[in-house]
Amino acid sequence: MDRRVLLVGTRKGAFILTAQSGRRQWRLSDPHFLGSTVHHAVLDPRDGETLLLSARPGHLGPTVFRSRDLGRHWQEAARPPAFAKADAPQAGASVDHVFWLTPGHADERGVWYAGTSPPGLFRSADGGATWEEVAGFNSGYLPTIRAHVMEVPGGARLHSICIDRRDARHLYVALSVGGVFESGDAGATWRPLNRGVAADFLPDPSAELGHDTHRLVCHPLAPDRLYQQNHCGIYRLDRPGETWRRIGAAMPAEVGDIGFPLVVHPRDPDTLWVVPMDGSANWPRTSPGGRPAVYCSRDGGARWARQDAGLPREQAWWTVKRQAFCADGDEPLGLYFGTGSGELWRSLDEGNSWRRLAEHLPEIFSVAAA
Amino acid sequence: MQVVIPSQLHDYTGGRSRVPAAGDSLATVLDDLDRRFPGLRFRVVDEQGAIRPHIRFYVNRAAATSLAQPIAPDDELLIVGALSGG
Protein backbone atom coordinates (compact mmCIF):
# COMPACT_ATOMS: atom_id res chain seq x y z
CA MET A 1 0.00 0.00 0.00
CA ASP A 2 1.33 3.45 -0.86
CA ARG A 3 -0.32 5.29 1.97
CA ARG A 4 -0.57 4.23 5.58
CA VAL A 5 -2.87 6.02 8.04
CA LEU A 6 -3.02 5.97 11.83
CA LEU A 7 -6.16 7.24 13.53
CA VAL A 8 -5.49 8.27 17.10
CA GLY A 9 -8.33 8.98 19.51
CA THR A 10 -7.49 10.88 22.68
CA ARG A 11 -9.18 12.41 25.66
CA LYS A 12 -8.95 15.80 23.97
CA GLY A 13 -9.55 15.08 20.31
CA ALA A 14 -8.34 12.97 17.38
CA PHE A 15 -5.14 13.07 15.39
CA ILE A 16 -4.42 11.54 12.00
CA LEU A 17 -0.94 10.43 11.02
CA THR A 18 -0.16 9.65 7.41
CA ALA A 19 2.89 8.01 5.90
CA GLN A 20 3.83 7.17 2.38
CA SER A 21 5.42 3.86 1.44
CA GLY A 22 8.02 2.70 3.90
CA ARG A 23 6.12 3.90 6.97
CA ARG A 24 9.19 5.78 8.21
CA GLN A 25 8.12 9.37 7.69
CA TRP A 26 4.86 10.29 9.32
CA ARG A 27 2.97 13.54 9.28
CA LEU A 28 0.88 14.39 12.33
CA SER A 29 -2.31 16.33 11.67
CA ASP A 30 -3.67 19.17 13.70
CA PRO A 31 -6.29 17.97 16.20
CA HIS A 32 -9.79 17.14 15.08
CA PHE A 33 -12.61 17.90 17.52
CA LEU A 34 -10.19 19.41 19.99
CA GLY A 35 -11.67 19.23 23.47
CA SER A 36 -13.86 16.22 22.76
CA THR A 37 -13.01 12.76 23.99
CA VAL A 38 -12.58 10.50 20.99
CA HIS A 39 -12.84 6.91 22.14
CA HIS A 40 -12.53 5.37 18.69
CA ALA A 41 -11.85 6.37 15.09
CA VAL A 42 -11.92 3.70 12.40
CA LEU A 43 -11.52 3.69 8.62
CA ASP A 44 -13.75 1.29 6.69
CA PRO A 45 -11.52 -1.33 5.04
CA ARG A 46 -14.31 -2.15 2.58
CA ASP A 47 -14.13 1.16 0.73
CA GLY A 48 -10.94 2.64 2.14
CA GLU A 49 -12.48 6.07 2.61
CA THR A 50 -15.37 6.09 5.09
CA LEU A 51 -14.03 7.19 8.45
CA LEU A 52 -16.19 7.05 11.57
CA LEU A 53 -15.27 8.78 14.80
CA SER A 54 -17.02 8.81 18.16
CA ALA A 55 -16.97 12.15 19.97
CA ARG A 56 -17.93 13.02 23.52
CA PRO A 57 -17.38 16.67 24.38
CA GLY A 58 -17.35 17.71 28.00
CA HIS A 59 -20.61 19.58 27.80
CA LEU A 60 -22.62 18.05 24.99
CA GLY A 61 -24.12 14.67 24.35
CA PRO A 62 -22.27 11.91 22.48
CA THR A 63 -22.31 11.58 18.74
CA VAL A 64 -20.63 10.01 15.73
CA PHE A 65 -18.98 11.94 12.92
CA ARG A 66 -18.24 10.69 9.43
CA SER A 67 -15.67 11.75 6.88
CA ARG A 68 -14.97 10.51 3.39
CA ASP A 69 -11.84 12.57 2.84
CA LEU A 70 -9.70 11.66 5.84
CA GLY A 71 -10.96 14.42 8.06
CA ARG A 72 -11.00 17.40 5.72
CA HIS A 73 -14.78 17.49 6.05
CA TRP A 74 -16.93 15.94 8.73
CA GLN A 75 -20.64 15.21 8.85
CA GLU A 76 -22.47 14.36 12.03
CA ALA A 77 -24.70 11.29 12.16
CA ALA A 78 -28.29 12.35 11.60
CA ARG A 79 -29.35 9.88 14.30
CA PRO A 80 -26.48 8.95 16.66
CA PRO A 81 -26.70 5.83 18.82
CA ALA A 82 -29.40 6.36 21.43
CA PHE A 83 -31.51 4.05 23.56
CA ALA A 84 -35.28 3.89 23.15
CA LYS A 85 -37.21 6.36 25.24
CA ALA A 86 -38.65 4.60 28.25
CA ASP A 87 -42.33 4.81 29.14
CA ALA A 88 -41.65 5.66 32.75
CA PRO A 89 -39.55 8.69 33.75
CA GLN A 90 -36.08 7.80 35.05
CA ALA A 91 -36.44 4.23 33.75
CA GLY A 92 -34.53 4.52 30.51
CA ALA A 93 -30.84 4.54 29.79
CA SER A 94 -29.03 7.24 27.88
CA VAL A 95 -25.80 6.83 25.98
CA ASP A 96 -22.92 8.50 27.79
CA HIS A 97 -20.40 7.83 25.04
CA VAL A 98 -19.86 5.65 22.02
CA PHE A 99 -16.93 3.53 23.08
CA TRP A 100 -16.42 1.22 20.12
CA LEU A 101 -16.89 1.25 16.34
CA THR A 102 -16.61 -1.79 14.08
CA PRO A 103 -17.25 -2.03 10.33
CA GLY A 104 -19.67 -4.82 9.44
CA HIS A 105 -19.15 -7.92 7.35
CA ALA A 106 -17.40 -7.56 4.00
CA ASP A 107 -20.63 -8.53 2.22
CA GLU A 108 -22.66 -5.93 4.10
CA ARG A 109 -21.35 -2.67 2.71
CA GLY A 110 -22.44 0.29 4.77
CA VAL A 111 -23.15 -1.77 7.89
CA TRP A 112 -21.37 -0.70 11.08
CA TYR A 113 -21.74 -1.69 14.72
CA ALA A 114 -21.21 0.51 17.76
CA GLY A 115 -20.76 -0.35 21.42
CA THR A 116 -21.63 2.20 24.06
CA SER A 117 -21.39 3.08 27.72
CA PRO A 118 -23.60 2.23 29.47
CA PRO A 119 -23.52 -1.06 27.57
CA GLY A 120 -25.53 -1.10 24.38
CA LEU A 121 -25.14 -2.54 20.90
CA PHE A 122 -26.15 -0.43 17.90
CA ARG A 123 -26.17 -1.01 14.15
CA SER A 124 -26.05 1.32 11.19
CA ALA A 125 -26.99 0.18 7.69
CA ASP A 126 -26.07 3.43 5.97
CA GLY A 127 -22.42 3.99 6.71
CA GLY A 128 -22.97 5.50 10.13
CA ALA A 129 -25.54 8.16 9.17
CA THR A 130 -28.32 6.67 11.28
CA TRP A 131 -28.15 4.11 14.09
CA GLU A 132 -30.66 1.64 15.48
CA GLU A 133 -30.53 -0.42 18.62
CA VAL A 134 -29.81 -4.13 18.24
CA ALA A 135 -32.98 -4.84 20.13
CA GLY A 136 -32.19 -8.51 20.66
CA PHE A 137 -29.30 -7.44 22.82
CA ASN A 138 -30.29 -4.10 24.36
CA SER A 139 -33.89 -4.87 25.27
CA GLY A 140 -33.92 -8.65 24.83
CA TYR A 141 -30.83 -10.15 26.41
CA LEU A 142 -29.18 -7.36 28.39
CA PRO A 143 -32.00 -6.99 30.95
CA THR A 144 -31.63 -10.69 31.78
CA ILE A 145 -27.95 -10.27 32.73
CA ARG A 146 -28.18 -6.75 34.17
CA ALA A 147 -27.29 -7.92 37.66
CA HIS A 148 -23.96 -9.18 36.34
CA VAL A 149 -22.97 -5.99 34.52
CA MET A 150 -20.71 -4.25 36.98
CA GLU A 151 -19.68 -0.61 36.86
CA VAL A 152 -16.02 0.15 36.21
CA PRO A 153 -14.10 3.44 36.14
CA GLY A 154 -15.29 5.37 33.13
CA GLY A 155 -18.49 3.35 33.05
CA ALA A 156 -19.41 -0.17 32.01
CA ARG A 157 -19.14 -0.54 28.26
CA LEU A 158 -19.68 -2.84 25.33
CA HIS A 159 -16.62 -3.36 23.14
CA SER A 160 -14.75 -5.77 20.89
CA ILE A 161 -17.57 -6.38 18.44
CA CYS A 162 -16.39 -9.29 16.27
CA ILE A 163 -18.01 -10.54 13.08
CA ASP A 164 -17.33 -14.02 11.71
CA ARG A 165 -15.97 -13.59 8.19
CA ARG A 166 -17.86 -16.75 7.11
CA ASP A 167 -21.23 -15.58 8.38
CA ALA A 168 -22.40 -12.01 8.88
CA ARG A 169 -25.00 -13.24 11.35
CA HIS A 170 -22.43 -14.75 13.70
CA LEU A 171 -21.36 -12.10 16.22
CA TYR A 172 -19.33 -11.90 19.40
CA VAL A 173 -19.26 -8.94 21.77
CA ALA A 174 -17.62 -8.29 25.12
CA LEU A 175 -18.83 -6.37 28.14
CA SER A 176 -16.60 -4.87 30.73
CA VAL A 177 -17.84 -5.98 33.14
CA GLY A 178 -20.07 -8.79 31.93
CA GLY A 179 -18.04 -11.18 29.79
CA VAL A 180 -18.13 -12.55 26.24
CA PHE A 181 -21.41 -13.17 24.45
CA GLU A 182 -22.26 -14.85 21.16
CA SER A 183 -25.11 -14.55 18.69
CA GLY A 184 -25.73 -16.78 15.68
CA ASP A 185 -28.71 -14.87 14.36
CA ALA A 186 -27.49 -11.33 13.74
CA GLY A 187 -28.07 -10.29 17.31
CA ALA A 188 -31.60 -11.55 17.84
CA THR A 189 -30.57 -13.97 20.60
CA TRP A 190 -27.44 -14.28 22.74
CA ARG A 191 -25.60 -16.68 25.01
CA PRO A 192 -22.62 -16.29 27.33
CA LEU A 193 -19.24 -17.74 26.42
CA ASN A 194 -17.15 -17.49 29.56
CA ARG A 195 -16.46 -21.01 30.74
CA GLY A 196 -12.93 -21.49 32.00
CA VAL A 197 -12.29 -17.79 32.53
CA ALA A 198 -11.26 -16.75 36.01
CA ALA A 199 -13.19 -14.10 37.88
CA ASP A 200 -11.38 -13.72 41.16
CA PHE A 201 -13.42 -10.64 42.03
CA LEU A 202 -16.64 -12.68 42.15
CA PRO A 203 -17.76 -14.88 45.03
CA ASP A 204 -18.24 -17.78 42.60
CA PRO A 205 -15.03 -18.14 40.56
CA SER A 206 -16.82 -20.46 38.11
CA ALA A 207 -19.63 -18.02 37.43
CA GLU A 208 -21.09 -18.04 33.94
CA LEU A 209 -21.55 -14.26 33.90
CA GLY A 210 -19.86 -11.16 35.21
CA HIS A 211 -16.35 -11.60 33.81
CA ASP A 212 -14.18 -8.65 32.93
CA THR A 213 -13.10 -9.06 29.34
CA HIS A 214 -10.74 -6.24 28.46
CA ARG A 215 -10.29 -7.17 24.80
CA LEU A 216 -11.74 -9.90 22.61
CA VAL A 217 -10.34 -10.78 19.17
CA CYS A 218 -11.72 -13.18 16.60
CA HIS A 219 -8.99 -13.96 14.10
CA PRO A 220 -9.87 -12.51 10.70
CA LEU A 221 -8.64 -15.52 8.71
CA ALA A 222 -9.40 -18.26 11.23
CA PRO A 223 -12.61 -17.12 12.92
CA ASP A 224 -12.79 -20.22 15.11
CA ARG A 225 -9.73 -18.92 16.95
CA LEU A 226 -10.63 -16.45 19.70
CA TYR A 227 -8.32 -14.69 22.09
CA GLN A 228 -9.12 -12.46 24.99
CA GLN A 229 -7.14 -10.27 27.33
CA ASN A 230 -9.10 -10.41 30.53
CA HIS A 231 -8.86 -8.70 33.88
CA CYS A 232 -7.84 -12.17 35.06
CA GLY A 233 -5.39 -13.25 32.39
CA ILE A 234 -4.88 -14.05 28.71
CA TYR A 235 -7.09 -16.74 27.19
CA ARG A 236 -7.60 -18.68 24.00
CA LEU A 237 -10.68 -20.50 22.75
CA ASP A 238 -10.87 -22.75 19.68
CA ARG A 239 -14.44 -23.14 18.55
CA PRO A 240 -16.60 -25.09 18.56
CA GLY A 241 -15.00 -25.54 21.96
CA GLU A 242 -16.72 -23.83 24.86
CA THR A 243 -13.96 -23.60 27.45
CA TRP A 244 -11.29 -20.94 27.42
CA ARG A 245 -7.70 -21.91 28.18
CA ARG A 246 -5.44 -19.54 30.13
CA ILE A 247 -2.47 -19.16 27.78
CA GLY A 248 -1.22 -16.31 29.94
CA ALA A 249 -0.10 -18.94 32.44
CA ALA A 250 3.03 -19.25 30.29
CA MET A 251 3.95 -15.59 30.78
CA PRO A 252 6.88 -14.84 33.13
CA ALA A 253 5.56 -14.89 36.68
CA GLU A 254 7.21 -11.57 37.53
CA VAL A 255 5.34 -9.89 34.67
CA GLY A 256 2.03 -11.68 34.85
CA ASP A 257 -0.71 -11.81 32.24
CA ILE A 258 -2.82 -8.81 33.15
CA GLY A 259 -3.37 -6.09 30.56
CA PHE A 260 -5.85 -4.32 28.34
CA PRO A 261 -5.01 -4.70 24.63
CA LEU A 262 -4.38 -7.76 22.49
CA VAL A 263 -3.41 -7.82 18.82
CA VAL A 264 -3.29 -10.77 16.43
CA HIS A 265 -1.21 -11.16 13.31
CA PRO A 266 -3.74 -10.82 10.50
CA ARG A 267 -2.05 -13.57 8.47
CA ASP A 268 -1.11 -15.96 11.27
CA PRO A 269 -3.67 -17.09 13.85
CA ASP A 270 -0.90 -18.39 16.12
CA THR A 271 0.83 -15.03 16.50
CA LEU A 272 -0.41 -12.45 18.98
CA TRP A 273 0.87 -9.59 21.09
CA VAL A 274 -0.11 -8.18 24.47
CA VAL A 275 1.04 -5.27 26.61
CA PRO A 276 1.31 -6.47 30.22
CA MET A 277 0.39 -4.17 33.06
CA ASP A 278 0.83 -4.30 36.80
CA GLY A 279 -2.16 -6.03 38.38
CA SER A 280 -0.62 -6.47 41.80
CA ALA A 281 -1.92 -5.21 45.14
CA ASN A 282 -3.56 -1.88 44.27
CA TRP A 283 -3.82 -2.57 40.54
CA PRO A 284 -1.80 0.39 39.27
CA ARG A 285 -2.35 -0.75 35.69
CA THR A 286 1.05 0.56 34.63
CA SER A 287 4.03 -1.12 33.00
CA PRO A 288 5.35 -3.72 35.48
CA GLY A 289 8.30 -2.23 37.33
CA GLY A 290 8.14 0.89 35.17
CA ARG A 291 9.78 -1.09 32.36
CA PRO A 292 7.34 -1.28 29.45
CA ALA A 293 7.36 -4.20 27.04
CA VAL A 294 5.27 -5.96 24.48
CA TYR A 295 5.06 -9.73 24.71
CA CYS A 296 4.65 -11.87 21.63
CA SER A 297 3.64 -15.48 21.18
CA ARG A 298 4.10 -17.21 17.85
CA ASP A 299 2.63 -20.55 18.87
CA GLY A 300 -0.84 -19.63 20.03
CA GLY A 301 0.19 -18.77 23.56
CA ALA A 302 2.40 -21.71 24.54
CA ARG A 303 5.49 -19.51 24.80
CA TRP A 304 6.00 -15.77 25.05
CA ALA A 305 8.92 -13.52 24.15
CA ARG A 306 9.61 -10.08 25.54
CA GLN A 307 9.96 -7.30 22.95
CA ASP A 308 11.25 -4.06 24.41
CA ALA A 309 14.11 -2.91 22.16
CA GLY A 310 13.82 0.83 21.77
CA LEU A 311 11.34 1.25 24.61
CA PRO A 312 12.37 3.05 27.82
CA ARG A 313 14.42 0.81 30.10
CA GLU A 314 13.10 2.27 33.33
CA GLN A 315 10.78 4.82 34.92
CA ALA A 316 8.10 4.59 32.24
CA TRP A 317 4.79 4.05 34.00
CA TRP A 318 2.57 3.58 31.01
CA THR A 319 -0.99 2.46 30.61
CA VAL A 320 -2.01 1.22 27.17
CA LYS A 321 -5.75 1.05 26.77
CA ARG A 322 -7.64 -1.75 25.09
CA GLN A 323 -8.14 -0.09 21.70
CA ALA A 324 -4.78 1.71 21.71
CA PHE A 325 -2.74 -1.14 20.19
CA CYS A 326 -3.09 -2.26 16.59
CA ALA A 327 -1.41 -3.80 13.55
CA ASP A 328 -1.34 -2.73 9.94
CA GLY A 329 -1.55 -5.27 7.14
CA ASP A 330 1.88 -4.70 5.66
CA GLU A 331 4.79 -7.11 5.27
CA PRO A 332 6.54 -7.17 7.66
CA LEU A 333 3.70 -6.34 9.95
CA GLY A 334 3.70 -2.92 11.58
CA LEU A 335 2.55 -2.56 15.17
CA TYR A 336 1.46 0.66 16.86
CA PHE A 337 0.41 1.60 20.37
CA GLY A 338 -0.42 4.76 22.26
CA THR A 339 0.01 5.48 25.95
CA GLY A 340 -1.94 7.25 28.61
CA SER A 341 0.86 9.79 28.69
CA GLY A 342 0.31 10.73 25.05
CA GLU A 343 3.14 8.88 23.36
CA LEU A 344 2.68 6.97 20.13
CA TRP A 345 5.08 4.12 19.33
CA ARG A 346 5.60 1.94 16.29
CA SER A 347 7.43 -1.20 15.25
CA LEU A 348 8.06 -2.07 11.62
CA ASP A 349 9.51 -5.51 12.38
CA GLU A 350 6.67 -7.24 14.23
CA GLY A 351 7.66 -5.94 17.63
CA ASN A 352 11.39 -6.63 17.57
CA SER A 353 12.24 -2.94 17.81
CA TRP A 354 10.29 0.18 18.63
CA ARG A 355 10.51 3.86 17.85
CA ARG A 356 8.46 6.77 19.13
CA LEU A 357 6.27 8.40 16.49
CA ALA A 358 4.75 11.21 18.57
CA GLU A 359 4.77 12.57 22.09
CA HIS A 360 2.96 15.22 24.10
CA LEU A 361 -0.44 14.18 22.80
CA PRO A 362 -3.39 14.01 25.18
CA GLU A 363 -4.16 10.69 26.88
CA ILE A 364 -4.48 8.17 24.05
CA PHE A 365 -7.62 6.07 23.97
CA SER A 366 -7.39 4.40 20.58
CA VAL A 367 -5.02 3.74 17.72
CA ALA A 368 -6.29 2.24 14.47
CA ALA A 369 -4.20 1.57 11.37
CA ALA A 370 -5.60 1.74 7.88
CA MET B 1 -37.90 35.16 21.18
CA GLN B 2 -34.12 35.08 21.14
CA VAL B 3 -31.79 32.24 22.08
CA VAL B 4 -28.21 32.82 23.18
CA ILE B 5 -26.11 29.96 21.82
CA PRO B 6 -22.95 28.81 23.65
CA SER B 7 -19.68 28.35 21.81
CA GLN B 8 -20.04 24.57 22.04
CA LEU B 9 -23.03 24.74 19.65
CA HIS B 10 -21.74 27.28 17.17
CA ASP B 11 -20.97 24.54 14.67
CA TYR B 12 -24.71 24.02 14.40
CA THR B 13 -25.66 27.69 14.02
CA GLY B 14 -22.96 28.62 11.58
CA GLY B 15 -21.10 30.55 14.23
CA ARG B 16 -24.08 32.63 15.33
CA SER B 17 -24.24 33.26 19.07
CA ARG B 18 -27.80 34.56 19.04
CA VAL B 19 -30.66 33.16 16.97
CA PRO B 20 -34.43 33.70 16.94
CA ALA B 21 -36.69 30.75 17.77
CA ALA B 22 -40.35 29.95 18.21
CA GLY B 23 -42.19 27.94 20.86
CA ASP B 24 -44.10 28.28 24.08
CA SER B 25 -41.96 26.02 26.25
CA LEU B 26 -38.34 25.00 26.55
CA ALA B 27 -39.22 21.70 24.83
CA THR B 28 -40.90 23.32 21.82
CA VAL B 29 -38.18 25.94 21.46
CA LEU B 30 -35.58 23.16 21.36
CA ASP B 31 -37.69 21.33 18.79
CA ASP B 32 -37.74 24.48 16.68
CA LEU B 33 -33.99 24.88 17.00
CA ASP B 34 -33.49 21.23 16.06
CA ARG B 35 -35.57 21.63 12.90
CA ARG B 36 -33.36 24.49 11.78
CA PHE B 37 -30.09 23.14 13.18
CA PRO B 38 -30.43 19.35 12.93
CA GLY B 39 -28.81 17.42 15.74
CA LEU B 40 -28.64 20.31 18.19
CA ARG B 41 -31.32 19.03 20.54
CA PHE B 42 -29.66 15.66 21.18
CA ARG B 43 -26.46 17.37 22.20
CA VAL B 44 -28.22 19.21 25.06
CA VAL B 45 -31.06 16.83 25.98
CA ASP B 46 -30.63 13.05 26.11
CA GLU B 47 -32.88 10.39 24.61
CA GLN B 48 -34.88 10.11 27.83
CA GLY B 49 -35.67 13.82 27.80
CA ALA B 50 -33.21 14.75 30.54
CA ILE B 51 -31.12 17.90 30.31
CA ARG B 52 -27.47 16.92 29.86
CA PRO B 53 -25.45 17.17 33.09
CA HIS B 54 -23.23 20.04 31.96
CA ILE B 55 -25.84 22.08 30.12
CA ARG B 56 -27.81 24.84 31.81
CA PHE B 57 -30.87 26.71 30.53
CA TYR B 58 -31.92 30.12 31.77
CA VAL B 59 -35.09 31.98 30.80
CA ASN B 60 -34.59 35.68 31.38
CA ARG B 61 -31.64 34.75 33.60
CA ALA B 62 -33.74 32.42 35.80
CA ALA B 63 -32.71 28.77 35.81
CA ALA B 64 -34.99 26.46 33.84
CA THR B 65 -34.63 22.86 34.97
CA SER B 66 -37.60 21.33 33.18
CA LEU B 67 -38.39 21.08 29.50
CA ALA B 68 -41.94 22.04 30.45
CA GLN B 69 -40.75 25.51 31.46
CA PRO B 70 -43.08 28.04 29.73
CA ILE B 71 -41.47 30.57 27.43
CA ALA B 72 -43.13 33.76 26.17
CA PRO B 73 -42.47 35.44 22.81
CA ASP B 74 -40.47 38.26 24.39
CA ASP B 75 -38.33 36.01 26.59
CA GLU B 76 -34.66 35.33 26.14
CA LEU B 77 -33.38 31.77 26.45
CA LEU B 78 -29.77 31.39 27.50
CA ILE B 79 -28.07 28.04 26.82
CA VAL B 80 -24.85 27.58 28.76
CA GLY B 81 -22.20 24.89 28.68
CA ALA B 82 -21.07 24.80 32.29
CA LEU B 83 -18.30 23.24 34.36
CA SER B 84 -17.55 20.02 32.55
CA GLY B 85 -14.22 19.26 34.18
CA GLY B 86 -10.58 19.49 33.24
Image: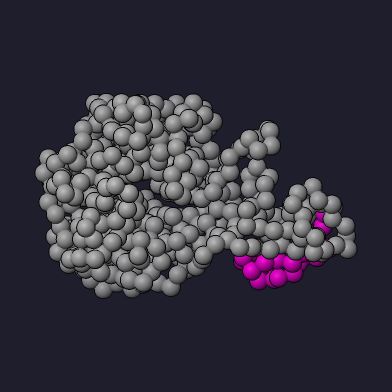
Percent across and percent down for residue A329 are: 24, 55
User: Image height check: is B14 above or below A195?
Assistant: below
**Quarter assignment of residue B5:** bottom right
Residue A151 rendering spot, x and y as whole percentages: 46, 41
| Colouring method of the image | one colour
Q: Residue at x 21, y 36 (%)?
A: A246
What quarter of the picture does the N terminus of chain A occupy? bottom left
Of residue A70 and residue A258, the one placed in the foreground of this image is A258
Q: Residue at x 32, y 57 (%)?
A: A319
Q: Quadrant of residue A343?
A: bottom left
Q: Is residue A344 visible?
A: yes
The stretch in magenta equals B1-23
Residue A23 visible, this angle: no
For the C terminus of chain A, give its image quadrant: bottom left
Horizontal arrangement in the rendering, residue A240 relative to residue B12 (left or right): left
Q: On the picture, is A328 further left or further right than A69? A: left
Query: Which of B43/B60 is in front?
Result: B60
Q: Quadrant of residue A177?
A: top left
Residue A173 in the image: above or below residue A6: above
Position of residue A368 in the picture relative to residue A138 (left or right) = left
Please provide percent x and percent y for residue A70. 42, 64
**In the drawing, does residue A355 fall left or right of residue A117?**
left
Is residue B3 found inside the magenta-colored segment of the image? yes
Which residue occupies the extreme front position in the image? A281
Q: Residue B12: percent from the left, percent from the top?
A: 64, 63
In terms of depth relative to the viewer, which is nearer, A81 or A96? Answer: A96
Which residue is depicted at the point 48% across and 59% down?
A: A37
User: Could you tell me which residue is drawn at 85 percent across and 62 percent down?
Assistant: B75
Residue A268 inside the magenta-drawn segment: no
